[in-house]
Amino acid sequence: MAACATATRGLQQLLVLSALGFLATSAPQPPNIVLLLMDDMGWGDLGVYGEPSRETPNLDKMALEGMLFPNFYSANPLCSPSRAALLTGRLPIRNGFYTSNGHARNAYTPQEIMGGIPNSEHLLPELLKKAGYTNKIVGKWHLGHRPQFHPLKHGFDEWFGSPNCHFGPYDNKVKPNIPVYRDWEMVGRFYEEFPINLRTGEANLTQLYLQEALDFIKTQHARQSPFFLYWAIDATHAPVYASRPFLGTSHRGRYGDAVREIDDSVGKILSLLQNLGISKNTFVFFTSDNGAALISAPKEGGSNGPFLCGKQTTFEGGMREPAIAWWPGHIAAGQVSHQLGSIMDLFTTSLSVAGLKPPSDRIIDGLDLLPTLLQGHMMDRPIFYYRGNTLMAVTLGQYKAHFWTWTNSWEEFRQGIDFCPGQNVSGVTTHTQEEHTELPLIFHLGRDPGERFPLSFASAEYQDTLSRITQVVQQHQKSLIPGQPQLNVCNQAVMNWAPPGCEKLGKCLTPPESVPEKCSWAH
Amino acid sequence: MAACATATRGLQQLLVLSALGFLATSAPQPPNIVLLLMDDMGWGDLGVYGEPSRETPNLDKMALEGMLFPNFYSANPLCSPSRAALLTGRLPIRNGFYTSNGHARNAYTPQEIMGGIPNSEHLLPELLKKAGYTNKIVGKWHLGHRPQFHPLKHGFDEWFGSPNCHFGPYDNKVKPNIPVYRDWEMVGRFYEEFPINLRTGEANLTQLYLQEALDFIKTQHARQSPFFLYWAIDATHAPVYASRPFLGTSHRGRYGDAVREIDDSVGKILSLLQNLGISKNTFVFFTSDNGAALISAPKEGGSNGPFLCGKQTTFEGGMREPAIAWWPGHIAAGQVSHQLGSIMDLFTTSLSVAGLKPPSDRIIDGLDLLPTLLQGHMMDRPIFYYRGNTLMAVTLGQYKAHFWTWTNSWEEFRQGIDFCPGQNVSGVTTHTQEEHTELPLIFHLGRDPGERFPLSFASAEYQDTLSRITQVVQQHQKSLIPGQPQLNVCNQAVMNWAPPGCEKLGKCLTPPESVPEKCSWAH
């Protein structure tokens, strides 16, 4: 049945696209959109953000040719919620990518998760499709791996990549290896057809993902179809990997090898756009899903520069991201914008680039950054930092207020799970969940980007900031309608035992008995 | 007598200089040299080094037009020794700028210090003079304030600035305010004729220092004299200050205001060189004397980016510095060099620029960086990190070995004196002096710039590194002849009670009885 649906849908697409191709000869083509989304890459990992080894010449050049954002944020300190936010333009608390199983708990989409992106959410590719775009996701989807959550059911036309993280290898008995899909069907599994050598760190996945991107761009260019490429690669997520030509080339070890290969790949993508003469008609944005995973440092984790802590936390190191916009001829070269930006803005901005409006029947958190990108406008807006359904902190202008502080439990910490290695700000990087909802800890991120010196409660600056932030939070909470939490229920039976296409490859596995249970989220 | 000596010497200078001016019309003029030395500015304070507020457009442009060094080091985590090292090309342990009064103690030149730069040391301006240079120091001298240490007795032709830090205000009874000199004589005192408003942070000193630099450049250019300008300004040393147009303009608070004024000033100096058409004949280098003073953060201290701790310590935050070389037409634009550089290299490199060789009768620690600057050559060399006469650590290539770890005493730390606020690396940022001379703690600075993850003693990498570093240290220690320590003896009577010129201003104060005593250096 899946195969039949595939064929029907494919035919429909062809008809729609050929109609659009026909139209394209008579109407101006909307700009192409390329979103380059990194996995666990930190703010401090690029030369242009001060990484001392300075091994990202292509990304640094991209910044020099475009606009750099030092104050750009993910929507969550963890991967799945952040990606769901990017593609919906909405906070995870709205689109359902959170758990309510524990207080202030991070959650994502491992294999055993039941949930995924609800049908009620409108994804960026779905909307772009209406304007004639051909949409491809390369790399990690992470918005649910059960059939109803398949990216080609949510607006993408093509997919090469995986539904979950490339953890493993698994035994295919207690846990199946993660499948790699081409479009509707799996074409193999990590550690099997798509090897990752955990000892040497060698894997050619970034090269495969690069080739997919280049081929897609060339094909769509030849077809004169506007395209959306969502390049969601994962070489900097542990276990980090690089292909042989890059292994051992970095001063930063294996993590740096992965960054170098990514930098090289981004250079090749931008060069292709230039060589095809479509750079001026292609909006490109580079960012990452959350802060560097310091728990994996130094071998498999990156750098959050001068910021506090990393992935999993709502300190700056967990959610402030590298971000570069590139659109020659439209975005003037060599700019730095201090606009507070969000990964959710990529939704609204991409729609705006395509000449579309975001859905008007729901709250969209993403702003249209085009006025910033094209005219340097600055817009006031808050940044919300959630863990699960708990609002941990909010940034407004230069001020950040923490309503809750927590890294992880003492129990975990004593076992060596440390989200803030080498950092310890007394009363701030707490290992018990500390409530500050009445008197938040407030930091001035300009004077104190490392969140080390809370403002004095008694100061006029504190009082003034608190009153402004309180208003914003009250407004936010008043209008908030939490989505149905998607990350509450787990079930071993829903893992990737028998993805579509497994039968053709003889790779179908037998699932265990279905036993839905409450997911346990430790931090 | 001082006034008489001044007049005689001034006349001699005029004669010598006019002779050189005459020669200059017939022989090619050696390049001018401008060293821009910051005070307590940290590696992470410039946009080009990743400072998130990115408020240094002129310095960032300077880097884009020249060569940036991410691995450039001061010679000491404190001001006076670092400056003595710059001007002599020699480690403080050799030139005498250290104390032996306590184990691993930082020392500098407060007013009560007896010592200063020994006559036996050859300073950069002394040597440049032989090649016909006119030399000016603007700003902080810090190499001793007693008459024999006066900068005009050590090769400088002109001086506008102070002998010590701009601490104060003092009562002129227990302690005199620091004088400001023009050439041989004082022209006033800080907080008196040269006000610094500690409440508002307003002072126009950077503007005075800028004007001195611009005037000197113009004058020497008109005279066709090659010049050496040592611009040693101190606005980023606590108490930090800025002039009114810059106050309140930074996102980083008062410290940022000071940085912005400096950045603007550097822009004006480089512009003048360009407008006069002498940029291609002027070698300019920008760096700082030691890491940011985190003890003064966030209001009066800067940023060391991703590095550990700050001023006073031999962790990277204490001694890794921003460094930019600029020499249009000679140093190709947009380069980054990973050469391990040292502030002492400015001595040897400046001599090389002038066509001179360093003294051959003593060990010179500074390397000639011209092969790096002009041809991109890389040279192997160690970086030594001293506190007092104790070798705390050494860096060789990517590896850094700590033989001693210490931040400061528990007693001080408990009183709130914290050189590593928000940072705590167990067993590394110790508050007792920990000896590791047999088995040093070794870090790989490429993978772990923050010195958070010591290599395992059992690893082959550790053993290999240890054997290479041991050789280098043994060689260093075998050839080491420590200079006479200059920072051991203090005496209230030697303070700036009656500097030359005070009688003309009616500003001579009466010194107390002379009681030499051992200086007490707490950390």
Image (cartoon, coloured by chain):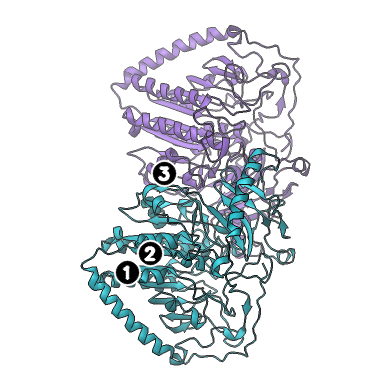
Chain colours: A cyan, B purple
Whether labels 1 and 2 belong to a single chain: the reply is: yes
Does residue A146 sit above or below A442 in this rendering?
A: below
Residue A272 x %, y %: 31, 64
SS class, disc 2: strand
CA gap, disc 3 to disc 1? 36 Å
Quarter of the C terminus of chain B within the rendering: top right
Residue B281 x %, y %: 34, 32
SS class, disc 3: strand
Does residue B304 sit above or below A205 in this rendering?
A: above
Q: At label 3, which amino acid type do we have?
A: Met
Tell which tag, 3 or 1, sits nearer the viewer: 1
* Callout 1 touching callout 2 (CB < 8 Å): yes
Residue A231 x %, y %: 42, 68
Q: At label 2, which amino acid type do we have?
A: Val
Q: Is residue A307 visible?
A: no
Tag of residue B67: 3
Whether labels 2 and 3 belong to a single chain: the reply is: no
Q: Residues within 10 Å of mark 2 (few under 14, many from 20)?
A: many
Label 2, on which residue? A34
Chain letter of the residue carrying label 3: B
Q: Residues within 10 Å of mark 1 (few under 14, many from 20)?
A: many
Relative to the observer, which residue lies in front, B375 or B253? B253
Q: Residue at 37% across / 37% down in the picture?
A: B327
Residue B253 x %, y %: 57, 38
Relative to the observer, which residue lies in front, A225 or B137? A225
CA gap, disc 2 to disc 3? 33 Å
Tell which tag, 2 or 3, sits nearer the viewer: 2
Q: At label 1, which amino acid type do we have?
A: Ile
Q: Residues within 10 Å of mark 3 (few under 14, many from 20)?
A: many
Chain letter of the residue carrying label 1: A
Tag of residue A217: 1
Chain letter of the residue carrying label 2: A
